[in-house]
Every structure is written in C-alpha cells, then in structure tokens.
Image (spheres, rainbow, N blue to C red):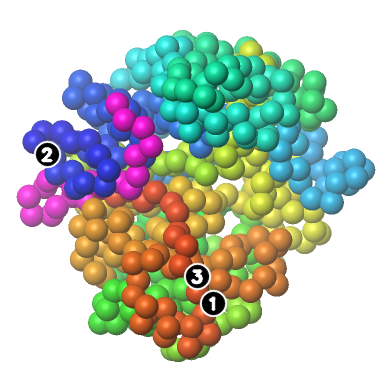
C-alpha cells in the first residue's frame, strides 16, 4: 500500500505517507495532497485548514496553532508557536475597573489575537512545496458548499449557550432551526470568503486587511480592546524545540508558553522507575505515573509564563538533577494529597493531526479555539469564531506576582502541546491529542506505551488511560485529587490504588490520541488515530 488514511483506530501501514486526524474527510484531504506530490507540511496545512471548517467548535481561523516539524533532509526539528497575544490595551487594572475579578470566559474580552493563520503561512514558507492558495481550496469548498450535519450535531449547535448570545454567531450557526430536527447542510459562506482572502493574500490579508478590520470592528462594537496595531504586529515564534532524553530516545516538545515542558518533566521523573517490570495497568505502574504528573503540574503552576515577560527557570525544570529531587517525594504506595512546587535556586475541546511522508518529513500539529466554540463570538462578515484563550479556565490570572498574570501584549500559558520522538537523528514516532490540561497526561502515557511497553501505534493510542484531576490552574487550588480510570483497568488495580489513598472513579478519560511511527527496519509508516466523528 503506497498511502493510507486511518479509519476508526485501525492500524495504517504505508510506504509513502500517512495522515491521522479525528475526521476522515480531513484525513482524505491531506492524503490527496501527498498523492499529488506534496510533502508532509503541505498535507498538514491543507488538513488543518479543512479541520478549521469541519471540526465545528474545536478549531478555526480565529484560534491558535503549535507545530513541530522534522525535516527529512536536515534531520532537524523546528518548532512554530502560533499563539496570539492579549490586546496592548489590556491590563488587570482595566478589567478591575469594569468590576471583573477574573478574565471573562466568553465574548470579546476572552479572546487573544488569533495566531493560527500566521503559523500556517510560516510553516509552509519554510518547509512546504505547494502554494497556499491550492492547499486552502478543500476548506473553501467545505465552507461554501456545506457540511452534512446529522440531527445530533445540529441540536448541539442550537443548544450552545455561547453562540446564542451573539447575533453574528446566530446568523452563521443557528440560522435554520429545521436542521435541529433532521439531517441537513450547514454552510458558512462568510468563512469561505475569509479563506479565499487568505488564499489570495496570505498573512497580510488576515492581519493587515479586510479580515483584521472586521475583527477590530467587532471588538469595538462589543466593548473590546483590539486595534489594528494588535494584528499588524503579530508574528509567530520560530524556535528550537525543548527536549529530553528518555531511555535513549530524544523527546521533542513545544516550548513556553505551551505546557510541553510538563511532559518532559514527567518523563524525567518517571525515568528513575522500571515501569515495564511493574506491568502495564498495574497499580504500581499507574501510581508512579500519576505522582509524577502531580509534581510536574505543581511546578507548571508555580513557575510557567510567557518567557518574554517572565523569568521562567526552564533549564532547571527540565534538568535530570531536578527530576531526581522531585522523584524523592514519591512514596511507592501512598498517594500525595497536596503536592508542592520544587525548590529552584535562581539567580536574579481542540483538535490535532499528524502527517509523515516518504521523504522522512514528519509534522505534529495541534490547533484550537480553547474551549468549544471559543468565545462564542463570530466576527460579523468573516464567519470566524474568535478564541477564548486568555479567559477560559487556564487563561490569565489577576494576582500580582503570578507568572501567568495578565499584561498588555502578553501570551497566556497554553494547554496546547505536541511531540516528536527520535532515535538518533531519525524520527521514531510523532503524536498528540486534544484535551486541555489532559494533553500532557495523555501524551505522557502514549510515549511510555510506545517506549516502555513496545506498543505499536494502534495499541499505544487505544490502550486504557487515566487522568488525574485537578489540573494546573489557581482555580483548582485546594480541590482534592480524583483519579479517573478507564473502565478496562482491572478491579484489582482499582482496589489497590484506593488502598494507597487514591480517590478513583471509572468514567472514562476523553482525548483523541494520534501517533505515526516509522518502522526502523522496513521504513514503513505505521499510523493510528482515535475516534471519527463523520464519514466521507
């Protein structure tokens, strides 16, 4: 088989290319690009743009993107941070004068400058081979010709309280109530127009032209703070990804302000234990991973912020010596209840995709509006839903001295993260998952499934998972930890974890894990993805 597209988590085996997403239509778009001679980056941009249309509420042109690219020629990994900043006029004092005690979770005050479009253009200019205009055509067709909606999908849109608060959003998503009663087609001609503008004019069409002007006008009409300067000055960050060595493999992750460093710290802590001999799904296996998670999340909360504004001790957090100190705090059979940050000596609902091609290129890509349908606000005339990144749950804080305190033009800490794992200078596997603060827990498990337990992609992404609540937000402070276990874990494991002090529930874990692995012997690509909402 030359090419393969993943369906319902069945293992793909291919020689020339694999595309894995949650939506078969989007996977087929990327697959078609590979078949027509495009590379993995070309396919990833076309796939991401399609997801912006069909992944209702999960992502969009009004959201953000984080990308890792492995270049098959140079054998180098490059990171692209496509997250947006708070308006230059935003400040804690301003919002307090409005009577707010924390950031808004819906509406214009919850939105940052959208960063996704600039990230798409940057990755394509640096690593792609096909024109943006051609790659955006499938997304334009989905927007203008319509997406077939099942009754359940349409009812979900009609019932979304955020959308109903804004006439511009109602006009796009709630315009035909008949669709809530039967299958029908949802079109978004305004979004199609916006995509055409970007296809023809690139980043300037979005950040300096008609689209930015429409978003600023929307902001002004809703009492927001955006100006054209906020958009005209936006750029993506291009950087060398952060990394760690885990059992002889190099794990690359997205850097600050993403939460990718959590995954690397978790791996560093876990490296001191032979979890393979504990046995997958045993109480010891789960306990040691959960306790590593708790420590890494505590450090994230204490130290992490936008490095342009905060002195984040990232090197210390990712050092093996720091991991060794943190590891000493894990009791072999007793759950921690109030984990604290480690001492450091100091001077002074989202979607994702992965693509690999025959030339050794690989792209791990994650895009999001933050929460479902983001701010709920569509910029009139654009069809674009704005994100709620700076306001939702793990957005900016008001507290003085907090590393994630709101400041003008600052980027908030991001839940988004994605990874690439290499053996030597060759890609071993890549992957990611949506899921907010669950991401660094689910990615942590997928990586160890592949490395410690030798699982191929289909097993690695579909194996039973756990999630430890709460996450890393000040609003979670003081909440008791709850360990949510997949129902496939044994009753014996649950009973032992409870004896060790874990509060356990059996109600599933969410996420949609994706992985592509290159077999070192044959060079064949093996891919798998969880879930599939719609069929092509």
**Image height check: is 87 above or below 253?**
above
**Circle 2 residue:** 15
**Residue 211 is inside the magenta segment:** no
Label 2 vs label 1, nearer the camera: 1
* Residue occupying the point 8% across, 36% down: 1
* Residue occupying the point 54% across, 63% down: 314
Mark 1 or mark 2, which is nearer the start of the sequence?
2
Q: Main secondary structure of the magenta part?
A: loop
* Residue occupying the point 48% across, 87% down: 500
For the C terminus, give its image quadrant.
top left
> Cβ–Cβ below 8 Å for labels 1 and 3?
yes
**Image height check: is 215 above or below 432?**
above
Is residue 94 something that shows in the picture?
A: yes
* Residue occupying the point 31% across, 30% down: 535
Image coordinates of residue 343 in percent, x first then y, are 62, 78
Image coordinates of residue 130 in percent, x first then y, are 31, 20
Q: Nearer the viewer, residue 179 or 85?
A: 179
Q: Is residue 145 left or right of residue 437?
A: left
Q: From mark 2 to mark 3, how far is it between C-alphas?
A: 42 Å
Q: Nearer the viewer, residue 53 or 39?
A: 53
**Image height check: is 519 above or below 86?**
below
Image coordinates of residue 352 in percent, x first then y, are 41, 41
Secondary element at image label 1: loop
**Circle 3 residue:** 505
**Circle 1 residue:** 503
Magenta extent: 517-536
């Amino acid at each position: 088989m030359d090419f393969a597209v993943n369906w319902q988590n069945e293992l793909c085996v291919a020689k020339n290319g694999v595309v894995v997403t949650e939506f078969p239509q989007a996977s087929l778009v990327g697959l078609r690009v590979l078949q027509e001679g495009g590379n993995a980056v070309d396919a990833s941009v076309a796939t991401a743009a399609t997801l912006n249309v069909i992944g209702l509420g999960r992502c969009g042109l009004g959201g953000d993107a984080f990308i890792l690219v492995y270049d098959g020629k140079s054998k180098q990994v490059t990171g692209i941070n496509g997250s947006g900043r708070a308006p230059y006029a935003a400040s804690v004092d301003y919002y307090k004068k409005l009577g707010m005690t924390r950031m808004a979770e819906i509406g214009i005050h919850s939105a940052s400058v959208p960063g996704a479009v600039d990230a798409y253009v940057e990755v394509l200019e640096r690593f792609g081979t096909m024109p943006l205009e051609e790659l955006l055509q499938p997304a334009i067709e989905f927007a203008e010709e319509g997406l077939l909606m099942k009754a359940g999908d349409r009812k979900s849109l009609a019932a979304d309280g955020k959308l109903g608060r804004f006439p511009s959003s109602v006009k796009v998503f709630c315009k035909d109530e008949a669709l809530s009663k039967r299958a029908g087609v949802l079109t978004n001609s305004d979004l199609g127009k916006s995509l055409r503008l970007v296809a023809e004019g690139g980043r300037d069409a979005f950040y300096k032209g008609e689209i930015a002007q429409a978003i600023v006008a929307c902001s002004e009409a809703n009492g927001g703070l955006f100006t054209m300067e906020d958009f005209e000055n936006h750029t993506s960050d291009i950087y060398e990804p952060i990394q760690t060595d885990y059992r002889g493999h190099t794990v690359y992750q997205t850097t600050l302000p993403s939460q990718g460093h959590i995954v690397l710290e978790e791996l560093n802590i876990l490296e001191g234990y032979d979890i393979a001999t504990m046995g997958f799904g045993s109480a010891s296996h789960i306990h040691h991973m959960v306790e590593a998670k708790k420590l890494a999340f505590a450090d994230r909360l204490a130290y992490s912020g936008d490095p342009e504004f905060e002195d984040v001790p990232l090197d210390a957090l990712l050092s093996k010596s720091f991991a060794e100190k943190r590891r000493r705090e894990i009791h072999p059979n007793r759950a921690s209840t109030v984990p604290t940050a480690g001492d450091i000596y100091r001077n002074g609902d989202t979607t994702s995709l992965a693509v690999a091609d025959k030339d050794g290129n690989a792209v791990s890509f994650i895009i999001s509006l933050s929460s479902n349908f983001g701010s709920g606000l569509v910029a009139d005339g654009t069809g674009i839903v704005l994100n709620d990144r700076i306001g939702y749950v793990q957005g900016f804080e008001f507290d003085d001295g907090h590393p994630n305190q709101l400041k003008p033009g600052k980027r908030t800490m991001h839940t988004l993260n994605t990874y690439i794992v290499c053996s030597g200078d060759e890609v071993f596997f890549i992957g990611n998952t949506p899921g907010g603060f669950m991401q660094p827990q689910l990615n942590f498990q997928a990586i160890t499934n592949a490395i410690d337990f030798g699982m191929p992609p289909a097993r690695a992404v579909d194996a039973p998972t756990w999630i430890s609540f709460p996450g890393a937000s000040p609003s979670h402070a003081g909440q008791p930890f709850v360990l949510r276990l997949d129902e496939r874990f044994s009753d014996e494991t649950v009973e032992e974890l409870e004896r060790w002090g874990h509060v356990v529930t059996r109600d599933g874990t969410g996420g949609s894990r994706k992985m592509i692995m290159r077999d070192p012997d044959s060079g064949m690509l093996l891919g798998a993805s969880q879930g599939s909402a719609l069929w092509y």
